[in-house]
Image: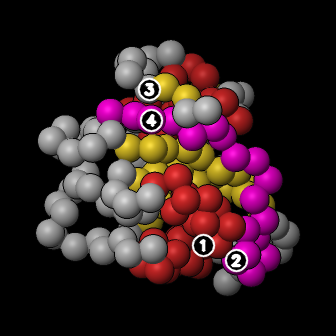
Amino acid sequence: MNPAAPVPAWIAIGGNQGEVRATLEAAIEAVDALPGTRVLQRSTLYRTPAWGRTDQPDFINGVIAVETGLAAPDLLGNLLGIERRFGRLRDEDAGRWGPRTLDLDLLLYDDQVLELPGLSLPHPRLHERAFVLVPLAEISPGLVVPGRGRVDGLLAKVDASGIEAIP
């Protein structure tokens, strides 16, 4: 089921394996090419320390804002398909927070609060992750995360040390 009109959504992008910057650029183009979807804004890319599992290379992360006519589950399904096209395998080999060629996380879909199998909106750990909040605050500082507050206020509550913009 598609929404009646296009809605805004925010997607975290990242990776730490292979030619990450090139992969992220190509992934942004792939998102922009999805049916009824266009990229409106993109953050700077940031080098961020590995989170969760620290015995791996630093990540490169960013956030894009899109407008989409796809329903949230359909958008997520397309994002997972893009990940697979770029070699991402969501399996137990890498484990949670392990290395990856590409990570596309649906952070917010309009102002929806949604709990479906495999999809929670807003993203359940968004408010804890400086590597998401830094680029999100760059492009949408006043955005309200339902149930959590404004992005700029959430960023003020986390440790963003070690995150640096990549020229």
Q: Mark 1 or 4 closer to N-term?
A: 4
Question: CA gap, disc 2 to disc 4?
Answer: 27 Å
- Nearest to the observer: residue 114 or residue 18: 18
Q: Mark 2 or 4 closer to N-term?
A: 2
Q: Mark 1 or 3 closer to N-term?
A: 1
Provide residue 39's location: percent of width, then percent of height. 75, 59
Task: Determine which of the numbered discs, if any, sits on residue 34 in the image.
Answer: 2
Provide residue 122's location: percent of width, then percent of height. 51, 50
Q: Is residue 38 magenta?
A: yes
| Contact between labelled residues 2 and 1, with CB atoms less than 8 Å apart | yes
Amino acid type at image mark 4: Arg
Which residue is label 1 attached to? 75
Residue 80 visible within the image? no
Which residue is label 4 attached to? 47
Question: CA gap, disc 1 to disc 3?
Answer: 28 Å
Q: Which label lies toward us, 2 or 3? A: 3
